[in-house]
Structure formats: C-alpha cells, structure tokens
Image (cartoon, grey):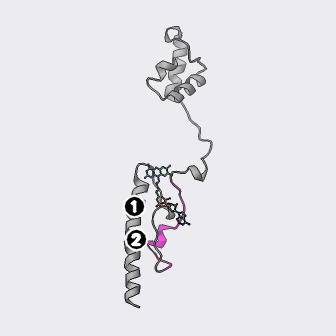
C-alpha cells in the first residue's frame, strides 16, 4: 500500500495516512477488502491536520508586528515621528504570504528608504 500511495503523495504523508487508517504499509493492494479501501480513500480525502501551535521565532519565515505603517510616510519611508529616520522590510508591521511578496517588500522599501535617507543627509549637509 505504501508504495502505491507514494506515487500520489509525499512519502511521509503516505505513512501518516496509512497509520491513521490503521493499515499496515506492507499489505499488498490485492489483499485489501473494499471496506478497507474505502477507509483509506476517506483518509486521503478527509485528512484533517489540527494546528497545535507555531514554531519558535528562529524558525519564522516572516513576522508580524513592528513599526506601524501609519507612522511611516509611504513616498519616502520616513518616520512621521522622528526626522531623519527611515524604515524598511521586516522592521515594519507588514507581512504577506510567502511567494516572494515579503522579499519584494524588503527590496522595494529598502531601495526607497536608502535613497530617501541619502537625500535627507545631502539636504542636511547643504543646509550646514
Ligand atoms: C527560511 C526563510 C524563508 C523565507 N522565504 C521567503 C519566500 O519564499 N518569499 C518571501 O517573499 N520571503 C521569504 N522570507 C522572508 C524574507 O526573507 C524576509 O521578509 C526579508 O529577507 C526581510 O528582509 P529585511 O532586510 O527586512 O530583514 P533581514 O533579511 O532579516 O535582514 C536584517 C539584517 O540585519 C542584520 N542585523 C540584525 N541586527 C543587527 C544589528 N544590531 N546590527 C547590524 N546588523 C544587524 C541581520 O544580520 C540581517 O542581515 C523567508 C525568510 C526565511 C527566514
């Protein structure tokens, strides 16, 4: 059974499904009764995965929380509270699904914050 399930599912998931269906992984398909096959089919189609918690921060892909975007000017990434301070990336309270969105946020806001900070520094220098 396990080798058949592994054609369609990741190895470790196939193992879990067989365990949950209370089927031995070495049973040949030909020896499975229709009832047992139905139990197996039910496990595959109705597998529930209860979420028991989250992994620690060190394992996080992205984090929520940080500097509120309401305190940041979106056209420069400047702090609305503290002149000369610029924010980008994970330090801001912005997070998205994985798939490139977070890294794009980091690059885009980093680029803008860097340019804006340089402009601010040059303006400060020019004003003595
Ligand atoms: C395992 C993993 C997988 C991910 N996969 C994806 C994905 O598929 N798609 C996606 O969009 N995003 C993904 N992300 C999220 C994405 O990588 C981050 O959102 C992005 O890198 C954040 O960029 P950042 O520059 O804000 O912060 P970081 O990349 O965390 O950079 C912060 C930098 O600051 C340095 N630093 C920290 N403290 C100090 C200090 N006191 N002095 C000097 N330097 C300091 C750190 O060493 C680090 O280099 C993933 C993240 C992880 C961890």
Q: Residue at x 39, y 90 (%)?
A: 127
Task: Give the vertical position of 7 relative to 90 (above or below).
Answer: above
- Magenta segment: does it hold 45? no
Specify start and end residues of the magenta stretch as a single range. 62-82
Q: Which disc number belongs to residue 42?
A: none
- Few, some or many residues within 10 Å of mark 2 (<14, 14–19, 20+): some
Residue 23 at x, y = what percent?
58, 18
The answer to which of 105 and 53 lies nearer the viewer is 105
Q: In the rendered view of the protein, which quadrant contains the C terminus?
A: bottom left
- Few, some or many residues within 10 Å of mark 1 (<14, 14–19, 20+): some
Residue 92 at x, y = what percent?
49, 64
* Residue identified by numbered label 1: 107
Would you say 69 lies left or right of 112 here?
Answer: right
Task: Give the vertical position of 91 relative to 117 (above or below).
Answer: above
Q: Which disc number belongs to residue 114?
A: 2
Farthest residue, direction bottom? 128
Question: Magenta stretch: dominant SS?
Answer: loop
């Amino acid at each position: 059974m396990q080798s058949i399930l592994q054609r369609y599912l990741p190895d470790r998931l196939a193992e879990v499904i067989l365990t949950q269906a209370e089927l031995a992984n070495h049973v040949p398909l030909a020896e499975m009764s229709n009832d047992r096959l139905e139990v197996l089919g039910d496990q595959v189609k109705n597998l529930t995965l209860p979420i028991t918690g989250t992994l620690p921060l060190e394992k996080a892909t992205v984090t929520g929380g940080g500097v509120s975007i309401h305190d940041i000017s979106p056209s420069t990434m400047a702090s609305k509270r503290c002149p000369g301070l610029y924010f980008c990336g994970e330090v801001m309270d912005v997070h998205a699904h994985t798939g490139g969105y977070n890294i794009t946020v980091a690059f885009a806001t980093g680029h803008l914050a860097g340019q804006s900070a340089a402009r601010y520094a040059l303006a400060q220098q020019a004003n003595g």
